[in-house]
Amino acid sequence: MGQIDWELNLLSLIPFHAKLDEVEPLIYEASSAIHLGIGESVVEAVWSMNFFEEITFTDIDEKKLGVLAGFLKKSFPKTQLMTQIEPNDSDLRIEHVLRVLTDTRRSLGLRRLRTRFRTKRINLRPLDILDLKGFNEKFDFAFFFGFTTAFEKALETGHSLLLPISNIKRLLKKSGIAILSDFLPKEDVIMRLDDLGIERVGIYTFCIRG
């Protein structure tokens, strides 16, 4: 197996957890966005950099953020990267990430994105959506892709889903929108969100407004 094939196979193991054809009609170019639970999904990060001037990528796992930091530092040297997390060396190359993103979009019938990255500043920081103590920033958009796994863990630890929902809303400007999407959702979480009357905008996607 060649180096390119190995990298593409590795990227396929870092899935894009959202249903993009349900998400993209809701978004527009804006100044700021936050991603919750991004893990080490470089594909999700590169996708977002097409739309927003400043992005905050968060996850509860600092090691995963270190992988993302290493990729961003190498692939976007002119973009200001603000983080106290130590970047890990990354062998992933931007052209291969773009290929995976293009193939994902094509499979959903979406047009190809222009390779015009808008992001000038990136913040990376650990964050637990169940505890926003000391986090007071507000954003135009909040994204939580693959969210039902985290919500299910909240239920398993005795929390109501109202806690992460209210915390997500706290992250938004008054005109802000949070988009929660999960390509492989936990059905019990989906049913609970429906019972709570959370706005549903697709089979896999929910919306919370500021």
Image: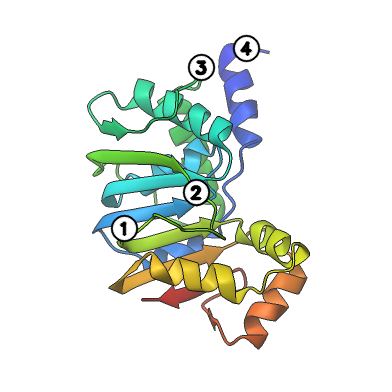
Q: Is residue 56 above or below residue 73?
A: below
Q: Is 71 located above or below residue 50 in the figure?
A: above
Asked if disc 1 and disc 2 are in contact, CB closer than 8 Å, the reply is no
- Looking at the rendered structure, the secondary structure element under dot 2 is loop
In space, the residues marked 2 and 4 are separated at their CA atoms by: 37 Å
Q: How far is mark 2 from mark 3, CA to CA?
A: 26 Å
Residue 127's mark?
A: 2
Looking at the picture, how far across and down is residue 36, in whole percent?
Answer: 49, 53
Q: CA distance from mark 1 to mark 3?
A: 32 Å
Compared with 113, 169 (above or below) is: below
The mark lying in front, picked from 3 and 4, is: 3
Badge 3, how many Cα within 10 Å: few under 14, some, many 20+? few
Give the residue number, with chain letter if any, for mark 4.
2
Which mark identifies residue 91? 3
Q: Which residue is mark 1?
A: 137
Q: Quadrant of residue 163?
A: bottom right
Q: Amino acid at mark 4?
A: Gly
**Mark nearer the N terminus (1 vs 2):** 2
Q: Position of residue 182 (x, y in %)?
A: 61, 61
Label 1 Cα neighbours within 10 Å, binned few <14 / some 14-19 / many ≥20: few
Given contact means CB atoms under 8 Å apart, are the residues at marks 1 and 4 in contact? no
